[in-house]
Each structure stands twice: as structure tokens, then as C-alpha cells.
Amino acid sequence: MRSLLPLLMAALVAVTAFPDGADAVWTPIANPPGTLLVKQVGNFTVIVYSNAAPRRHRPLQLVTVVRGETQPVGNGVTDYRLVLAVNNTDTGSTAMYQCVVRGKPGSRATTWVLRSFALYTQAA
Ligand SMILES: *[C@@H]1O[C@H](CO)[C@@H](O)[C@H](O)[C@H]1NC(C)=O
Ligand SMILES: *[C@@H]1O[C@H](CO)[C@@H](O)[C@H](O)[C@H]1NC(C)=O
């Protein structure tokens, strides 16, 4: 057991050094709240997440896209990483979430995919 410890520590350091993967290069979106596509993508993610759990609809509604970044993944497909202000329409409280969505702007043929959606806890 004792001999495993240095290996575990090395693995932890590696994970900390590359939190998003070494190849992640994100470009900030200039004006997320004023960009129709970004609002639509944000709205899409909240709707998908609200209905993600069977028999347990989450009463969430997009208030605004606070911030966003993009990363091309090839073939015109783009990852959108957005910070969203989301209203819980049951309680009226607003919380920040970060999501990653992959899709192809302007294409109806390519399905948009919600890759992650989680409470955003870092300082704004
Ligand atoms: C999200 O979509 C709903 C329904 O289409 C719309 O009423 C709302 O204004 C949209 N929200 C934003 C922030 O664009
Ligand atoms: C949140 O939802 C409630 C219920 O629909 C609404 O009364 C309230 O104005 C919303 N708040 C925001 C910040 O959109």
C-alpha cells in the first residue's frame, strides 16, 4: 500500500496541472448577452438540462448568458462554454451554471449536444 502513494500523488499533480485538457484553447465571446446564437445555445442547454431527469422536471429558466467562450473542434463544429444565470421559477432564486455545448452554427443537420452542465462556483 505504502508504495502506491507516490504514484497517486503524481497522478493528482497531473490532473491539477491540466484541468481542461492540455489542448484546450478557448476564445472569449465578445458580447454574450447581445448575441442571438449564444442566447439560443444558452436557452437550449437550460431546456435540455431541465428535462434531463425522467419524471423530475427542473423548474429552470435562462435569465442571461453572463460569459462565453468557444473552441473549434473541427469540421465547423464548435464547443461553447457558457456561464449562465439561471432562475429557479419555483423559488425565484437565481444561480450561476457553467455548461459546455457542442454544435455546428447554421446547420440543422448536426445535432447539438449538451456535454456538461453544473453549478458554477468560481468567483465571477
Ligand atoms: C429563451 O427562450 C424563451 C422561449 O422561447 C424566451 O421567451 C426567452 O426570452 C429566451 N431567453 C433568452 C435569455 O433569450
Ligand atoms: C424567476 O421566475 C419567477 C417565476 O416565474 C419570476 O417571477 C421572476 O421574475 C424570475 N426572476 C428572474 C430574475 O427572471
Image: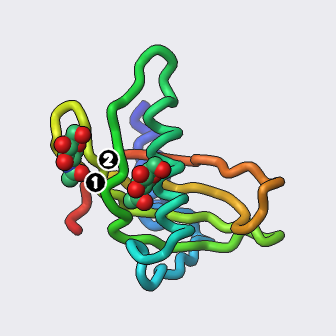
Q: Work out which quarter of the rendered image holds the C terminus and state it.
A: bottom left
Q: Are marks 1 and 2 in contact (CB under 8 Å)?
A: yes
User: What's the residue type where badge 2 is placed?
Assistant: Leu
User: What's the residue type where badge 1 is placed?
Assistant: Met
Note whether residue 94 is visible.
no
Distance of label 1 from label 2 (alpha carbons): 6 Å
Residue drawn at 44 percent across, 34 percent down: 50
Q: Quadrant of residue 5?
A: top left
Q: Position of residue 64 (x, y in %)?
A: 34, 62
Viewer-proximal residue, 81 or 15? 81
- Circle 1 residue: 96
Which callout, 1 or 2, points to the residue nearer the camera? 1
Q: Above or below — where is 116 with respect to 82?
A: above
Q: Position of residue 71 (x, y in %)?
A: 61, 73
Disc 1 on helix, strand or loop? strand
Q: Work out which quarter of the rendered image holds the N terminus and state it.
A: top left
- Circle 2 residue: 119
Q: Above or below — where is 94 with respect to 89?
A: below
Viewer-proximal residue, 43 or 11? 43
Residue drawn at 53 percent across, 39 percent down: 48
Q: Position of residue 18 (x, y in %)?
A: 49, 65
Which mark, residue 59? none
Disc 2 on helix, strand or loop? strand
Q: Quadrant of residue 13?
A: bottom left
Question: Label 2: few (<14), some or many (≥20) within 10 Å?
Answer: few
Residue drawn at 25 percent across, 37 percent down: 89
Residue drawn at 78 percent across, 62 percent down: 107
Question: Label 1: few (<14), some or many (≥20) within 10 Å?
Answer: some
Q: Quarter of the picture for ligand 2?
A: top left
Mark 1 or 2 closer to N-term? 1
Determine the residue located farthest toward the top in the rendered image.
Answer: 55
